[in-house]
Image (cartoon, grey):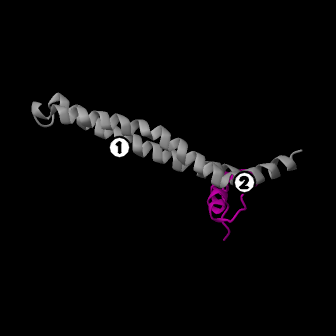
Amino acid sequence: MKVKYEKNQLEEVENIRGEYCRREESDLEKLKKLDAGVKRPAVISAITVGTAGTLVLGTGLCICLGAIGSQSLLPLGVVLGVVGIAVAACGWFIYRAVLKARKRRYSQEIITLSDKILGENA
């Protein structure tokens, strides 16, 4: 006995099958992955440092407002707040430094691949 499947069921089978079949990446997909691989570590580093700085700033603010500790800890709260602001501001500089280093590392590969793509479309 042979089972007949409806069109939408066959499409679903094709989608599932496609997930397991090996397919070759196009040059454009490779270029997009390289570009994301260059930018992602810089973004992650900047967000991590910015978040840490914001947490330190918030702790200092809580100390200053008396939510943590007593009024005698006010100078500590101010110092923590300033340190938190400085650390959060460093996130931008870390982003730029990491991005610059990654661009330098992958620039030749990206340029070669993009020239190949542009040459094919000329």
Dot placed on the residue nearer the N-terminal end, 1 or 2? 1
Dividing the image into 4 quarters, which one contains the C terminus? Answer: top right
Residue appearing at x 86%, y 46% in the figure: 121
Q: Which residue is mark 1?
A: 52
Magenta residues, start to end: 1-29
120 lies left or right of 45: right
User: What's under tag 1, amino acid-wise?
Assistant: Ala
Camera sees residue 25 = yes
Dividing the image into 4 quarters, which one contains the N terminus? Answer: bottom right
- Circle 1 SS class: helix
Residue appearing at x 25%, y 35% in the figure: 79
Rendered image quadrant of residue 26: bottom right
53 lies left or right of 71: right
User: What's under tag 2, amino acid-wise?
Assistant: Gln
Residue 19: x and y in percent read 62, 60
Residue occupying the far top of the picture: 65
Residue 11: x and y in percent read 67, 54
Residue occupying the far bottom of the picture: 1
Residue appearing at x 64%, y 55% in the figure: 105
Q: In the depicted view, which residue is nearer to us: 22 or 95?
A: 95
Label placed on residue 108: 2
Categorize mark 1 by other alpha carbons within 10 Å: few (<14), some (14-19), many (20+): some
Magenta stretch contains residue 38? no
Magenta stretch contains residue 7? yes
41 lies left or right of 30: left
Q: In the depicted view, which residue is nearer to us: 34 or 100?
A: 100
